[in-house]
Image: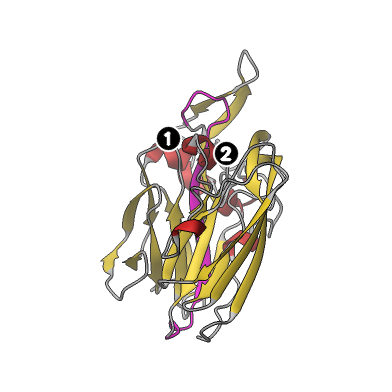
Amino acid sequence: MAGVPLIRFAAGAEGGVERFAVHDQAALGHASMIGDQVPAPGAPGALDSLLLPTPPLPHEPGRVREYRLQAIDREIEVAQGVHFAAWTYNGTVPGPVIRATEDDLLRVRFVNGGAHPHTIHFHGIHPANMDGVFEVVDSGDEFTYEFPARPYGMHLYHCHTTPLKKHIHKGLYGAFIIDPPEPRKPAKELVMVMNGFDTDGDGENNFYSVNGKAFYYAKYPIEVRRSETVRIYLANLTEFDLINSFHLHGEFFRYYPTGSTDFFEYTDTVMLTQGQRGIIEIDFHHTGKFMFHAHQSEFTELGWMGFFDVVD
């Protein structure tokens, strides 16, 4: 092994997970946290359905886009050997990526297969009776959300049943993309939902990730091409922490807050509160492996880090 892992796990006195950093001055540090030696759960491609969105469709007002989401209570592995009793949409945390084009009619059938009442609240513009606040769906019941998709941009959805922080932290959230009437330029498109997991129930996160598995994209770097724009649909659904962030090494990117206008900032770091989201566009100047991670050091060393493998 090239270096000492940045974290290790131990069972606490009551079966909880104790976390603590491990540092070795002689080790390679973050340079050692890439590839097969990384303590990350999951096989190659395990998160592809969350990372890689379906292609956008051309503008066609009135077209019906249908999805089915089911609340499912299940245990998921969030870090190597560490499991979390999650409340999920369709069995994953985050839930499936929902995508439509502006002026599509979005129809989402929600079936509550969980043990608790739930809803779906979509960010965007829609009628009050489709807002996911009043139409609480009891266990075993279902409800269909239907509204025109607007405005274009990067949005999100989540449960809005009280206690809200518990329903979000347990995993009931996901990315919601509405494409503009005039298509964006071609790009390699990715979705990243930043989140955290409190595995010992003390109201503080023990692990952090994008798309639900700590260190996953350090173990399996994301391959992209220098000649192709990389577009990331980024959202923050982290509970218990005021902010989360995205920092890219060795490059700058265009950041479009919410992605609903042409305004962008040219930077290498963005900070988001819970519910904030936007679109990142990167045109890499160099090949090689470039780290991306939260610019809160604790989050990085508890799982929220990865690499782009930029090739010609």
The foreground one among 254 and 215 is 254
Residue 198 on the magenta segment: yes
Residue matched to label 1: 240
- Name the residue rendered at 54%, 39% in the picture: 167
Q: Is residue 90 above or below residue 11?
A: below
Tell me which amino acid carries mark 2. Lys
Q: Is residue 191 toward the left or the right of residue 272 in the image?
A: right
- Name the residue rendered at 70%, 48% in the picture: 141
Q: Quadrant of the N terminus?
A: top right
- Name the residue rendered at 60%, 60% in the picture: 50
Crowding at label 1, few (<14), some or many (≥20) Cα neighbours within 10 Å? Answer: some
Work out how far the residue at label 2 is from the one at label 1, CA to CA, in angstroms. Answer: 12 Å
User: How far from the left and from the top, in percent, is residue 44?
Assistant: 69, 57
- Closer to the chain start, of discs 2 and 1, is 2
- Which residues make up the magenta segment? 182-204
Residue 228 on the magenta segment: no
The foreground one among 260 and 141 is 141
